[in-house]
C-alpha cells in the first residue's frame, strides 16, 4: 500500500471528497463535508475586540468592537472615563442628581446633596437644605467693613440705612429714616437769633441750610409790594383772626359785624368799607371813635382788638363825618339802548340836599308791586339793567344816597324791552342713552344742540314699559344729563326727551328703555369687630376698622364723626373680608379731636355708632 507522501496532491477539495477514517476499529471512508459538519470552524478577530452576537436569527459568533471609555485588559473590561466629554449637559444642579467622581483612583457616584456638607455658613449668612445661600435679616456691615463699601453720591427713598433697634441690627428705608424724628422729640432751642439756621429746599428736593438773617432780608424786600387781601362780606359775621385779620372787608350788603375778642386776639386789625346802599352795623362789644355803631354808605372804619391792663377792647375808628343832609330827588331819568334783555338808563344828580355818594336803582315789571335792586352805582349817573325778559314793560326809579341818608325816589320811568326774533323750534334730540344708577334711579344723557334754533332747556318724559301713555315728566332741564329718581326696583322704563326754546317744543326723541337695578339688601345688624384705639396724628394715613354684618352679603360703609348723634359727612365703602366680616381703611380725620366710628349699609339701613371714641391729635 502506498504511503501518504506517495499519493498525488489534490488541487481542490469539495464536501463530497472521501477520506479514510477508523470507525469502530474498521477502516472506512467518509465525505469531507460529513467529517467537518460537527467541528468548530476557525475564528479570526482583530485584537481588542470581543465575540458576541449582534445579528438577528441563528448563526455563529460575531466580532464586537470596544467603544470610547472602555478598555479590555487581560480578559477584563474596564471603564476608562474617556467618554465623559460626550455626556449631555445638565442645565441645573438639583439635590437628587448624582455626580461621577474619582475616589483615590476609583470611579464612584456621589449624590449632589453631599456638596452641602463641604460648606459652612459664616456670620450673618445662612445655607438652606436645598443649597440656597443668603444673608440673614440682621446682617449689617460692621464698622471695619464700611471703608471697603462703594460710595454713593445720592440716596433714594427706598434705599436702606442700617440702624440698631432695641439692641438688634435692623434696616430702615431712607424715606422713613428722615421721618423718624418729629419736632416734639427735638431738643428745645434757645432764643432765636439771626445766625440760627433752618432746613430749606431750593428748586429741588436737595436740602440746604438757611439763616434767619437771610430770611428777614427776603421778607423786607417783599414788604414794599405787599398788598392786603380783600374779602367781600355779603352776610352778617363774627370777626375771626383766621378769616378777617389784616384784610380789607368790603361790605356789599347791609350786614352786622360782631366782635368776638377771643377769636380776634390781641393785635387783630382790619379795615371795613361800606359799599352797600344800606347801613353796616357794628355789633355789641365795639367801642367807636364817633360813639355810633353804624357805618353809612361809603363810610369806612379801621378796627383793632387790643389787650391791656384794663382788659380787651374792640375799637373802631370811623373815618369821615356824616353828610350834613340827605340828597334831594334825582331828575332827568331816561333810557337809551334797549335790547330784548337789557335797558340802559341815565339821570341827573339832585339839585338840592347833600352831595350824593352813590345811587340805588330799583325796577319791577309794570303792574306788580315788588321792586328788585340793581347793584349800587358809585361815581356815575348811568346804569344798565340786564337779565330782563323780552317784550316786557318795566318801571324804573333811582334814589341818591350819602352818609346822612337816602333821598326820595325819582319819577317812575316805564320802558318795554325789545321782542326776541322768532326762532325755529329745536330739532329732534339725538344720542339719548339710559343707564341704571340704582334700584330707584336711571341716569339719562343725550347730545347737545347748537345753532339759532338750539334748545335752551329739555323735557324728559317716562313710563313703565308696556304702557301707551307717558305717566311722568320733568321739565326745565338745562344740562344734557339728568337722573330720574323715585322709580320701582327691577322695573323696565321707557324714556324720551324733547328740546324746548322760546319758540316752543321740538319733536320727541327716539324712545330708549332701561331696567332699574334690583333692590339692595337691608342691613339688620352691625357688630363691631375692630375699632380704632388711637391716638392718631390728624391728616396722616388711614385707620383700619371692621365689623360683622347681618345679613353677611349686605354691603356697608364706614365713617368718622365728632358726634355720637350726627352721622359722618363722608363715607368709605367697605370690602367683604370673609363670610360676614366687612372692613375698610378710613382716612384719618384732618382735624384733631375726639371722634366716633359709624357704620351703615350703603343703602342707609342699619346705622350704628360705636360707644367708644378715639383720639386724633
Image: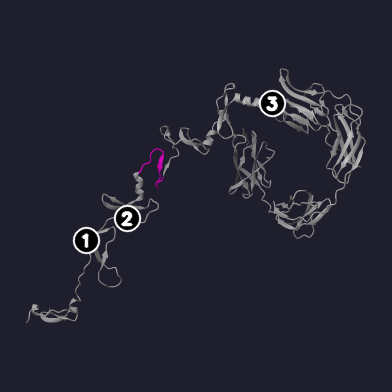
Residue at image x 80%, y 23%?
319
In the picture of the structure, the residue carrying the numbered disc 3 is 224
Compute the Cα span from label 2 to label 3: 91 Å
| In the image, residue 127 lies in the stretch drawn in magenta | yes
Number of labels in the image equals 3
Q: How crowded is mark 2: few (under 14 residues within 10 Å), some or many (20 or more)?
A: few
Image location (x, y in percent) of residue 617:
62, 32
Q: Are marks 2 and 3 in contact (CB under 8 Å)?
A: no
Question: Vertically, is 477 above or below 295?
Answer: below
Secondary structure of the residue carrying tag 2 is helix
Secondary structure of the residue carrying tag 3 is helix
**Residue 331 appears in the rendering:** yes
**The label number, if any, that marks residue 75 in the structure image:** 1
Compute the Cα span from label 1 to label 3: 115 Å
Question: Vertically, is 10 above or below 165?
Answer: below
Looking at the image, residue 361 sits to the left or right of residue 523; the answer is right
Residue at image x 62%, y 50%?
553
Residue at image x 73%, y 23%?
305
Nearer to us of marks 2 and 3 is 3
Image location (x, y in percent) of residue 544:
59, 41
Question: Vertically, is 601 above or below 326?
Answer: below
Q: How crowded is mark 3: few (under 14 residues within 10 Å), some or many (20 or more)?
A: few
Colour setup of the view: one colour
In the picture, which quadrant includes the N terminus? bottom left
Specify the quadrant of the image occupied by residue 49. bottom left
In the picture of the structure, the residue carrying the numbered disc 2 is 84
| In the image, residue 574 lies in the stretch drawn in magenta | no
Nearer to us of marks 2 and 1 is 2
Q: Give the range drawn in magenta.
A: 119-132
**Residue 531 appears in the rendering:** no
Q: Which residue lies furthest to the top in this view?
A: 309
Specify the quadrant of the image occupied by residue 424. bottom right
Amino acid at each position: 500500500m502506498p504511503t501518504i507522501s506517495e499519493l498525488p496532491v489534490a488541487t481542490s477539495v469539495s464536501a463530497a471528497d472521501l477520506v479514510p477514517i477508523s470507525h469502530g476499529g474498521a477502516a472506512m471512508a467518509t465525505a469531507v463535508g460529513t467529517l467537518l459538519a460537527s467541528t468548530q470552524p476557525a475564528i479570526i478577530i482583530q485584537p481588542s475586540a470581543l465575540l458576541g452576537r449582534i445579528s438577528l436569527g441563528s448563526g455563529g459568533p460575531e466580532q464586537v468592537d470596544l467603544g470610547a471609555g472602555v478598555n479590555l485588559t487581560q480578559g477584563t473590561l474596564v471603564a476608562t472615563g474617556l467618554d465623559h466629554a460626550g455626556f449631555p449637559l445638565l442645565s441645573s444642579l438639583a439635590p437628587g442628581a448624582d455626580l461621577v467622581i474619582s475616589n483615590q483612583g476609583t470611579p464612584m457616584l456621589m449624590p449632589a446633596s453631599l456638596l452641602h456638607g463641604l460648606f459652612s455658613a459664616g456670620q450673618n449668612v445662612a445655607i438652606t437644605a436645598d443649597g440656597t445661600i443668603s444673608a440673614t435679616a440682621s446682617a449689617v456691615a460692621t464698622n471695619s467693613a464700611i471703608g471697603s463699601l462703594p460710595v454713593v453720591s445720592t440716596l433714594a427713598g427706598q434705599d436702606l440705612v442700617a440702624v440698631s433697634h432695641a439692641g438688634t441690627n435692623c434696616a430702615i428705608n431712607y424715606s422713613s429714616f428722615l421721618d423718624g424724628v418729629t419736632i416734639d422729640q427735638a431738643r428745645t432751642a434757645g432764643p432765636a437769633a439771626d445766625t440760627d439756621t433752618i432746613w430749606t429746599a431750593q428748586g429741588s428736593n436737595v436740602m440746604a441750610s438757611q439763616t434767619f438773617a437771610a430770611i428777614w432780608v427776603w421778607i423786607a424786600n417783599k414788604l414794599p409790594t405787599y398788598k392786603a387781601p380783600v374779602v367781600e362780606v355779603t352776610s352778617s359775621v363774627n370777626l375771626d383772626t383766621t378769616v378777617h385779620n389784616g384784610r380789607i372787608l368790603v361790605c356789599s350788603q347791609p350786614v352786622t359785624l360782631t366782635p368776638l375778642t377771643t377769636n380776634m386776639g390781641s393785635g387783630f386789625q382790619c379795615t371795613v368799607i361800606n359799599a352797600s346802599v344800606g347801613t353796616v352795623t357794628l355789633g355789641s362789644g365795639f367801642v367807636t371813635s364817633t360813639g355810633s355803631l353804624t357805618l353809612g354808605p361809603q363810610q369806612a372804619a379801621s378796627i383793632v382788638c387790643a389787650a391791656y391792663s384794663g382788659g380787651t377792647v374792640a375799637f373802631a375808628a370811623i373815618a369821615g363825618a356824616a353828610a350834613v343832609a340827605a340828597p334831594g330827588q334825582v331828575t332827568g331819568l331816561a333810557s337809551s339802548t334797549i335790547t330784548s334783555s337789557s335797558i340802559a338808563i341815565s339821570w341827573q344828580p339832585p339839585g338840592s340836599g347833600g352831595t350824593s355818594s352813590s345811587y340805588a336803582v330799583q325796577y319791577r315789571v309794570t303792574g306788580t308791586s315788588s321792586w328788585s335792586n340793581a347793584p349800587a352805582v358809585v361815581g356815575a349817573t348811568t346804569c344798565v339793567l340786564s337779565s330782563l325778559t323780552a317784550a316786557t314793560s318795566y318801571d324804573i326809579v333811582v334814589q341818591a344816597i350819602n352818609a346822612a341818608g337816602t333821598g326820595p325816589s325819582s319819577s317812575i320811568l316805564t320802558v318795554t324791552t325789545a321782542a326776541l326774533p322768532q326762532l325755529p323750534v329745536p330739532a329732534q334730540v339725538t344720542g339719548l342713552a339710559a343707564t341704571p344708577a340704582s334700584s330707584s334711579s336711571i341716569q339719562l344723557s343725550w347730545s347737545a344742540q347748537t345753532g339759532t334754533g338750539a334748545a335752551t332747556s329739555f323735557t324728559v318724559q317716562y313710563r313703565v314699559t308696556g304702557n301707551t301713555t307717558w305717566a311722568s315728566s320733568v321739565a326745565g332741564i338745562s344740562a344734557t344729563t339728568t337722573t330720574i329718581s323715585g322709580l320701582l326696583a327691577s322695573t323696565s322704563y321707557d324714556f324720551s326727551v324733547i328740546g324746548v326754546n322760546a319758540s316752543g317744543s321740538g319733536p320727541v326723541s327716539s324712545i330708549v328703555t332701561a331696567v332699574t337695578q334690583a333692590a339692595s339688601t337691608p342691613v339688620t345688624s352691625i357688630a363691631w369687630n375692630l375699632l380704632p384705639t388711637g391716638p392718631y396724628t390728624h391728616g396722616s394715613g388711614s385707620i383700619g376698622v371692621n365689623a360683622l354684618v347681618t345679613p353677611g352679603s349686605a354691603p356697608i360703609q364706614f365713617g368718622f364723626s365728632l358726634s355720637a348723634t350726627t352721622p359722618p359727612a363722608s363715607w368709605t365703602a367697605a370690602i367683604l373680608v370673609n363670610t360676614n366680616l366687612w372692613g375698610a381703611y378710613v382716612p384719618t380725620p384732618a382735624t384733631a379731636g375726639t371722634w366716633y366710628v359709624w357704620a351703615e349699609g350703603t343703602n342707609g339701613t342699619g346705622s350704628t355708632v360705636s360707644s367708644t371714641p378715639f383720639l386724633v391729635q
